Image (cartoon, rainbow, N blue to C red):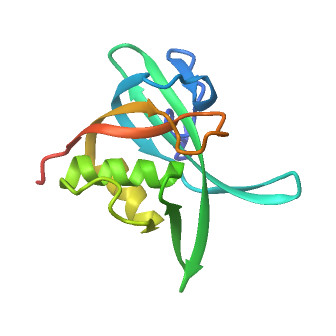
Amino acid sequence: MLDLGIQRGSSNFNDEDYDATYLSELEVGDELSGEIYISEIKTQEFRGNEINQFYLIITDHDNKKKWVCGINTSVYTNDDIVSIYGAKGGRVYQLIDSLNHTLNDTQLNQLESYSVVFDTFRETVNEKIDKVTAKAVQPSNPNAKTPNIAIIGAEALAES
C-alpha cells in the first residue's frame, strides 16, 4: 500500500466511533475535557458573502465524545501572514481570551480586541497544548443562536 499522507481524525469530523456534538447542539453550561484541535481556515460563500471559518474540535478519547465547533472569523493578510480578528464579546475573542487567561494567567476581558497570527495560534494549540476543558457559555449577543466556547482549563505539553 502506498502512503498518500492521508490522516485519519484531524480532518474527519464525523468519526463514527465518537458521539459528535456540533456547536448548534450545545447548551450553555455544557462542558467537555479532552484534546484540542484547530483546523485550517476555509473560505466559502454564504448568501452572496464570503465567510472565513475554522473548526475548533475538542475530543474526549476516554468517553468517545467530540465537540465540532465551526467558528466564523474576520481574516486579513499582511505580507502573506494571515491573521484573525476578534472583537470584545465575540466568539473568536472569547475563545482566544479564555485560552490566553488559562495558559498565561492574563486578566479576562481587558483588551478591546485580539489580532492573532493564525498559523502561530493554530500550531501552538495543536502541538503544544495537551488537554483543555471547554465550556459552552452565554454569548454577549442576545440574538446569537449558539453559545460561545470558553476554555476554563488547559494543560500545556512539557517542553522537551
- As displayed, is residue 154 above or below residue 121? above
Q: Quadrant of the C terminus?
A: bottom left
Quick one: which residue is furthest to the front in this view? 142
Image location (x, y in percent) of residue 80? 55, 80
Image location (x, y in percent) of residue 50? 77, 61
* Total numbered labels: 0
Quick one: which residue is furthest to the right in this view? 48
Quick one: which residue is furthest to the bottom in this view? 79
Choose top left, top right, bottom left or bottom right for residue 107. bottom left
* Residue visible at 46% across and 55% down in the picture: 93
- As displayed, is residue 95 above or below residue 123? above
Q: Nearer the viewer, residue 107 or 66?
A: 107
* Residue visible at 44% across and 22% down in the picture: 30
Image location (x, y in percent) of residue 132? 30, 36
Q: Is residue 88 left or right of residue 13?
A: left
- As displayed, is residue 69 above or below residue 78? above
Image location (x, y in percent) of residue 103? 22, 50
Q: Quadrant of the N terminus?
A: top right
Q: Nearer the viewer, residue 17 or 37?
A: 37
* Residue visible at 32% across and 61% down in the picture: 110
